[in-house]
Structure formats: structure tokens, C-alpha cells
Amino acid sequence: MIVEMSRGASREQVDHVVERAHSFGFEVQLNLGTDKTVVAILGSDTGKASTDVFEVLPGVVSVTRIMKPYKLASREFNPRSSKIKVSGVEIGGQRIVVMAGPCAVESEQQLMNTAMAVKKLGGLVVRGGAFKPRSSPFAFQGLEMEGLKILAKVKSDLGIPVITEVVDIQNIELVARHVDILQVGARNMQNFALLKELGKLKHPILLKRGLSATVTEWLTAADYLLAEGNKRVILCERGIRTFEDSTRFALDITSIGVVKRFSHLPIIVDPSHAAGHSAYVPSIAKAAIAAGADGILVEVHPNPEEALVDGLQSLAIPAFERLMAELRPIAEAVGRYV
Ligand code: PEP
Ligand code: MN
């Protein structure tokens, strides 16, 4: 951290900053200029003190952090890209991982039909929400326990891994018993109590980006999972809130490059929640793969017209088939395969 003192700062004020830094165990380098003093605060763990700790002291003008606030998620900490294996599927490797299925599990027949088509067309993981975090408490909240049982049946009957969202601490164990990957939804990205508990699991966790979270906040949230010992963290860009209202959210395609540059964690993209309309899903899914994403999480429904949740943004099976065919040459063009 670089602490800039005001022009007239007294020697006592500078010493006070130095004492405060020492109290945290940090090293200090003083640059006593003719009219301005700069204090460099050094140490591998300066992240444990917020910039406020120094900014609040008399005589301080500004405090700038040089190191990123996240640590375990950073490429500095782990230079090699992480690959996460789950039931025979590798996320972050050469192969593009397509996770697909309905927004919500609605019935055994609905999930089974979708899962069979997803598997046949080259999807590697089946998605389906059993607990749905809905904006309104009066909207369909998911089949809950029954939904989990259906997911477990699809997993064992078809031999394909399944992913579902966990919305609260009470249900972690229950969800973990039924599925392969646990998803943390955008609205829970900074539910730190939930993240800490999930960090104690062995299951991979898919951490969605919060709707108005910066990439730095997202990677710092990932540190909560990693710090508890769970190394199997997958990031998922799902669009952020901007002034644009012709789509549900705005897919931040740039975040793929930013994450790849600063983090070792794999990143997949959810084009469905970003777009909010099936018309835009294929183009942004392809853009995501071209931009270096490790996979996609896409909503597919056997009959979008009758979907209980997110029918407008769900691909019908023929549209999913076309998308899979279109993804292949794009993956190859960037040295991957589907
Ligand atoms: C979902 O994938 O089912 C979902 C609710 O997405 P998000 O958390 O990104 O809104
Ligand atoms: Mn949805």
C-alpha cells in the first residue's frame, strides 16, 4: 500500500502511520521528499488491513493498494490454470464444457427428456434448479426436495453429472447428497456465511458473478471458498446490470480475459441469464467460447412455452442442437474442442 501524506504533514503524523503499519506486522519504507512524504507499506499479507486503517489517520491524503485484495484466487498465488474434475468431466481443460438444462426442475419427465437430449447432443453436465431464488416470494420457488430427488435419478440413470443451486446454509448437506456441483447464485455471491460453509465441502462450487459485482469483488468472494480448503471453484459470468435495458443483463465478455489474466480459476459463461431472450443466447454463447471461456451454462427446455421459469430465455432442443453444431468450429478456432 502506498500512503501519501499531505504537504504540511508533521513528523509525528508520519511516525503515527509507521507505528500503525508496524502494529500489523508490516514493513515500511519511507520516502521523505522535500515537500511531500510517501510511506510504502509492504508485506505479503497487507490484505488483512483495509486502506481505511491508514486513510483515517491525521495528515494522510490518500492510500492506494498495489496488491489485489484477493489472494488464493490469484494467478500470483497459483500460476498454473486450475482444472476441476467432476465425475469424469474436466472443467478448465482443452474440452469446452457445456452444462445445459432447464432453469427449474418441473417434473421427472421434463428433466429426464431434457437430460437425454443434452447428453446425446454433447452436453457434459445437466443443470436444473430445485431451490429457486425468485425476485418475488409469490413466484414458483422450485420443487425443492422432490427436485433434488429427480436430479439424483437423472444422474444415476444417465450417468451424467448434475448441478443445482444451493440458496441457504440449512440445505447444503441435503443438496450435496444429491448433486455433483453446487451453484452459488448471483444474488448470493457475497453471502459470506454461505460461502464459508461451502468451502468446507469437497464438491466443486460454481460461483456466479453478482449482478453488480466487480471482477475484484467476485474473485475476493472466491477466496472465501478457497480459504476454507475447497480448491474446486468454478467461476460463472452471467451478465451485470448496466443502463442497457434491451437485454435482461449485459454480458461482460471482457471479464473472461480479466479473470484469465489475474486468476487461475476456470470460468464459464451463462448466456441465458445475461440475455434474457433465447434469440440472443447462441451469439453470446459463441462469443464467450471465442473469448476464452472454459464452457457455458445454458438453459434448455423441451417446451419453453410451458416452462414455469425463464421460458423466454430457454432454448428449445432443436435450437440447442444448432448451438452445439455452431460451437464446434469456434472451439477449434481457439484450440479447444466441444
Ligand atoms: C440460475 O442459474 O438458475 C440463476 C438463478 O441464475 P443467476 O443466479 O445468475 O441469476
Ligand atoms: Mn433461470
Image: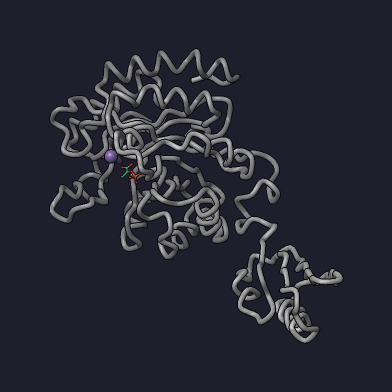
User: How far from the left and from the top, in percent, is residue 247?
Assistant: 31, 34
Residue 190 as seen in the image, left or right of residue 319:
right
On screen, residue 33 above or below 295: below
Is residue 210 rendered to the left or right of residue 12?
A: left
- Which of 61 and 298 lies nearest the eye of the viewer? 61
User: For ligand 1, which image quadrant applies?
Assistant: top left
Figure check: 192 above or below 77: below
Give the quarter of the image for residue 282: top left
- x 40%, y 13%: residue: 325
Picture coordinates of residue 295, whole percent (x, y): 47, 30
Q: Is residue 262 left or right of residue 38?
A: left
Horizontal and vertical percent position of residue 110: 19, 31
Image coords of residue 63 (percent x, y): 66, 67
Determine whether, in the image, residue 175 is placed left or right of residue 306: right
In the rendered view, how is the structure colored? one colour
Q: Which of 289 and 99 is in front in this view?
A: 289
Please determine whether, in this image, residue 83 is positioned above or below residue 76.
above
Q: In which quarter of the image is the N terminus?
A: bottom right
Give me the residue at 24% from left, 29% from top.
112
Residue 99 appearing in the image: yes
Whether residue 156 can be seen here? no
